[in-house]
Structure formats: structure tokens, C-alpha cells
């Protein structure tokens, strides 16, 4: 199965899909799935734009609204996570995941799904130590602080993700802390010399994400955020000798997010180094520039190379933002036993299903999902895993497709996502804002979140309609 991976999109969906078509034509292959690593900017209208933490000069409607309203359709199944420049109100509607637009699926603030049997997990947002241990307390209308804290990853989601058995692919916006030590650090610093201080002080990247990488040991880990292509290989200890404990809940010093001072959207970037690995190799001449307007020398995209890393290592790849002549997309081949046969040149229709283990984790941890600043104490790891095992029995007994003719009805715990969640326009598209164009929108309760909670028999606490303010 051919999978394309893209770094930061910053709302440039038209250019990203066109670049994908160009790659397919140039190399005579067909991509079946596109993964996008944050700063997606799912802006439905001008009021959503008031919920995105960027300086005023960078508040642009972008392309997403055309896919949201149906003027355009994503040409390939697209899976996305959130970053630190998002319409956070919309992604909060779909906290547990859901369709942002037809054929564009959001993994949620944290999540794991399966595509043709390939397990894809992800964590949205970036790390900031001050907010890590807090609950999900932010509400519309956001102020300067909550517009930023809402995209800071929480311990609640790191703990949930840590209980997964090893996924095939993990997506994050942030880089895992110290990932530069597993690649060509000096090569990274030649291209991004302003990373040097963070590298030397250990502040480059997210501590809890490195904890997850060490715990989960995924085959691939893809990131974005720092606007540079970088690859690394993390060797894991042999099975039985490494720790499977929950990632640290007391992370070291804050690896500060991209600064969003009023005069510079991408001013302060920092993260880790590239490794020369022929299995993921593409030409890299990316200079040191980070402004949205500047371009670089053209990069020739090489055809994908089929490979499956050994289980004892994780291949990490970070990609740039979508701009001309940047290294923002990679195409890989991922072996799967579930590929549906297609004619040469035809795109397969991937089967998108919920991951039963993630559903069990979601049920087990729902009582600890805090809607206030204060977060209740968590169970220890042994207790948490026992709770998940108990909930897995429930999932296998109660989660299945509703379709009478579905071939998945007899598979315990397996349900196609479209059987539960279907895209709905919860907010209007652009052009209807009127005099409220520059005001934050009211809260919209999304029926996809309601459907997800109903499937699991849990309360939909992501319903702030009682707090609704026009």
C-alpha cells in the first residue's frame, strides 16, 4: 500500500493534492493514503479563523473550506492530526476524532485507527510543561492564553496512548525529545543553526513523545513542526529488557513551541537531526529559511522504496511545510495483508476501521477525562492495563457494524468508521458571517462525537452547548 506523508500544510490543500498528482504522474504509481502531520488549519469560515493562534497577518482562510462545503473533494483518503496553528474550536468538536470533510479524517486530540489493517496512532498539538498535567478546561470564547493552551498536549492523552500495543505508524506534530541524537545532528545544525542552543540544553522536542516512542516502538514515526526534513533511526532494547511503563509524567524543561510573537509566525523553530538512510532517502538541500514567502532550490522527489523496518527500531522522519521546492512530502510502501486488488493505475479504496484496543482504552479512561483545570489522579499502570483488558471484552461483545450485509459483522470489536461517523457540516461555510465575521463563533456540538460516545456507551462530555455564546 502506497502511503504519502506530508509535513505542515498551513491550509494549502490545493497545492498539496496537486503535488501528489504530480508525483503520481512522474513516477507512474498511485498513492492510496495521505497522512498529514499538523498545522492543517481546518478553517470553515472567517469566524473559525478567530480561534487560530497566529498573528493577524497570517490569518488566511486557506483552501480547506472548499473541501468542507463540497466545492472540492479530497482525491485520496487523508488522515490528519492537529498542530499549534489550528482552528482549535473545530478540532475540539471532534476531540475523539471524526471527518473534518468528506475523505479527510481527523485522528482526534489522540487516537488510533486502522487502514487496511495498518494501525495508525497519533497525538495532536505540542508540548508545554505548564499545561501538561491540566484537564481539558478551555471554552469558547478563547482568550490569548486558552487559544494557545488548548493545543498543548495533555498527560491524559499520553497515558492513554502509552497503553496501546505497538502501532505500525505514529504521527505527531512535535518531534520527540533528543531525536537529533539518533541522526545527523551536525547536518541539521548546518541547515538550522538556531537549533544549536536547544540541542545543547536538551530542549529540542517533546519529552512525553520520546517516552511514547520508547514505549510503543512503532515501525514509523512521522512529524512536522520545525519546517525541515530530518530522518533518524532509533534502536530499541531487545524485547523483555526495555521498559513498558507509562512515559514520564514529570517531563524536563519545556522544549518551547514555535514562538508566535505578533511579528513572526514561524520565528523560533527548533528540533532534531537527519540520518542518511537509503530506505527513506530523498535529496536534501533545504537551507535555513523559515519565512512563508521564501523558496529554495528545487528538490527532486525519488520514487518510493518498499521496506519494512525490523521490529527493534523506529524510523523517524520529519518533513517541511508545503511551499514550492521544499521537502514536504514522502511516499513509502507499507506491506499489508488487507490490500484490495485494483487495476494498475487505479487508487484502492482503503478500509478505515476503529481500532478495538483504542476503543477499550477510551472506555477505560473516560472516568478520568477532566473538563476542568484540575485533573484527577490516574490509576497505576498495572491497574490501567487491567481496566483496558476488561473493557476489551466489552468492545468485542458490543462493537460491530450495523450493516446487515457487512462482512465485518462476525469480527469482534471491528467496526468501519463510516458505519458510525458520517460527515456533517456543523458550522456554515464562508460568506454567512455578516457583521460577526471578526468574532469567535458559538460552540457547535458535532453529531460525530455524539455517535462515537453512543457507540462506546459513554457520556458525551464534549458538548458545551449550555455555554453557547453567539
Image (cartoon, grey):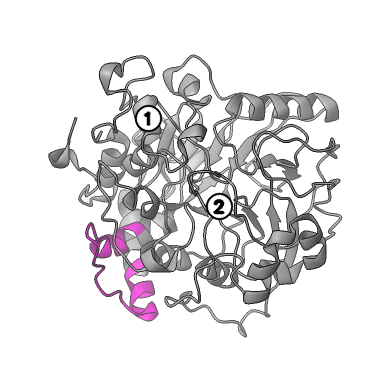
Q: Return the residue at label 1.
A: 422
Instruction: Characterize the local packing of mark 1: few (<14), some (14-19) or many (20 or more) Cα atoms within 10 angstroms.
Output: some
Task: Please name the residue shown 81% across and 66% down the image.
Answer: 186
Figure quadrant of residue 342: top right
Asked whether the residues under the numbered discs 2 and 1 touch, taking CB atoms below 8 Å apart as contact, a structural biologist would say no
Depth-wise, is mark 2 or mark 1 nearer the camera? 2
Figure quadrant of residue 168: bottom right
Q: Secondary structure at mark 2?
A: loop
Question: Residue 32: x percent and y percent?
Answer: 66, 34
| Circle nearer the N terminus (2, 1) | 2
Q: Which mark is residue 91?
A: none
Q: Is residue 159 magenta?
A: no
Question: Residue 469: x percent and y percent?
Answer: 17, 34
| Magenta stretch bounds | 362-388
In this image, 286 relative to 43: left or right? right
For marks 2 and 1, give the CA distance: 26 Å
| Residue 347 higher or lower than 205, as above or below | above
Q: Return the residue at label 2.
A: 173
Question: Residue 274: x percent and y percent?
Answer: 77, 60
Q: Nearer the viewer, residue 270 or 171?
A: 270
Q: Is residue 367 magenta?
A: yes
In this image, 178 relative to 420: left or right? right
Task: Please name the residue shown 60% across and 42% down the image.
Answer: 8
Instruction: Characterize the local packing of mark 2: few (<14), some (14-19) or many (20 or more) Cα atoms within 10 angstroms.
Output: many
Question: Residue 139: x percent and y percent?
Answer: 25, 47
| Residue 344 higher or lower than 178, as above or below | above
Which quadrant of the figure contains the N terminus?
top right
The residue sitting at the bottom extreme is 241
Can residue 319 be seen?
Answer: yes
Can residue 309 be seen?
Answer: no
Q: Secondary structure at mark 1?
A: loop
Q: Nearer the viewer, residue 337 or 353?
A: 353
Amino acid at each position: 500500500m502506497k502511503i504519502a506523508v506530508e509535513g505542515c500544510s498551513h491550509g494549502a490543500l490545493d497545492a498539496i493534492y496537486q503535488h501528489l498528482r504530480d508525483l503520481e504522474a512522474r513516477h507512474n504509481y498511485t498513492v492510496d493514503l495521505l497522512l498529514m502531520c499538523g498545522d492543517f488549519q481546518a478553517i470553515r469560515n472567517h469566524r473559525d479563523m478567530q480561534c487560530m493562534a497566529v498573528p493577524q497577518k497570517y490569518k488566511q482562510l486557506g483552501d480547506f473550506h472548499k473541501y468542507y462545503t463540497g466545492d472540492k473533494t479530497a482525491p485520496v483518503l487523508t488522515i490528519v492530526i492537529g498542530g499549534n496553528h489550528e482552528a482549535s474550536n473545530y478540532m475540539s468538536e471532534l476531540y475523539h476524532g471524526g471527518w473534518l470533510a468528506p475523505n479527510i479524517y481527523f485522528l482526534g486530540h489522540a487516537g488510533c485507527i486502522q487502514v487496511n489493517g495498518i494501525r495508525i496512532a497519533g497525538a495532536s498539538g505540542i508540548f508545554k510543561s505548564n499545561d501538561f498535567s491540566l484537564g481539558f478546561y478551555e471554552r469558547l470564547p478563547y482568550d490569548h492564553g486558552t487559544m494557545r493552551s488548548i493545543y498543548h498536549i495533555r498527560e491524559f492523552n499520553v497515558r492513554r496512548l502509552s497503553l496501546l500495543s505497538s502501532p505500525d505508524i505514529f504521527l505527531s506534530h512535535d518531534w520527540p525529545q533528543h531525536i537529533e541524537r539518533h541522526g545527523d545532528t551536525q547536518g541539521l545544525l548546518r541547515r538550522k543553526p538556531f537549533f544549536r542552543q536547544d540541542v545543547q540544553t536538551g530542549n529540542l522536542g517533546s519529552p512525553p513523545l520520546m517516552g511514547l516512542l520508547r514505549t510503543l516502538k512503532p515501525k514509523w514515526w512521522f512529524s512536522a513542526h520545525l519546517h525541515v526534513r530530518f530522518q533518524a533511526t532509533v534502536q530499541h532494547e531487545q524485547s523483555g529488557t526495555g521498559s513498558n511503563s507509562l512515559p514520564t509524567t514529570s517531563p524536563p524543561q519545556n522544549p518551547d513551541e514555535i514562538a508566535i510573537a505578533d511579528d513572526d509566525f514561524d520565528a523560533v523553530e527548533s528540533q532534531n537531526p537527519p540520518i542518511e538512510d537509503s530506505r527513506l532517502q530523498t535529496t536534501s538541500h533545504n537551507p535555513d529559511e523559515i519565512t512563508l514567502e521564501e523558496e529554495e532550490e528545487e528538490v527532486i522527489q525519488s520514487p518510493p522504496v518498499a521496506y519494512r523496518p525490523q521490529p527493534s527500531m523506529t524510523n523517524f522522519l520529519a518533513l517541511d511545510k508545503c511551499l514550492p521546492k521544499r521537502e514536504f512530502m514522502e511516499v513509502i510502501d507499507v506491506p499489508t495483508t488487507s490490500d484490495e486488488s485494483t487495476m494498475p493505475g487505479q487508487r484502492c479504496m482503503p478500509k478505515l476501521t476503529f481500532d478495538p484496543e483504542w476503543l477499550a482504552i477510551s472506555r477505560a479512561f473516560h472516568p478520568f477525562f477532566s473538563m476542568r483545570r484540575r485533573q484527577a489522579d490516574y490509576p497505576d499502570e498495572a491497574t490501567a492495563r487491567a481496566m483496558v483488558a476488561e473493557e476489551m471484552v466489552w468492545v468485542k461483545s458490543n462493537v460491530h457494524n450495523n450493516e446487515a450485509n457487512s462482512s465485518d459483522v462476525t469480527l469482534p470489536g471491528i467496526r468501519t468508521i463510516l458505519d458510525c461517523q458520517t460527515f456533517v457540516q456543523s458550522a456554515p461555510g464562508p460568506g454567512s458571517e455578516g457583521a460577526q465575521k471578526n468574532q469567535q463563533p458559538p460552540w457547535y456540538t458535532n453529531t460525530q462525537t455524539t455517535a462515537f460516545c453512543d457507540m462506546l456507551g459513554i457520556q458525551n462530555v464534549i458538548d458545551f452547548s449550555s455555554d453557547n455564546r453567539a
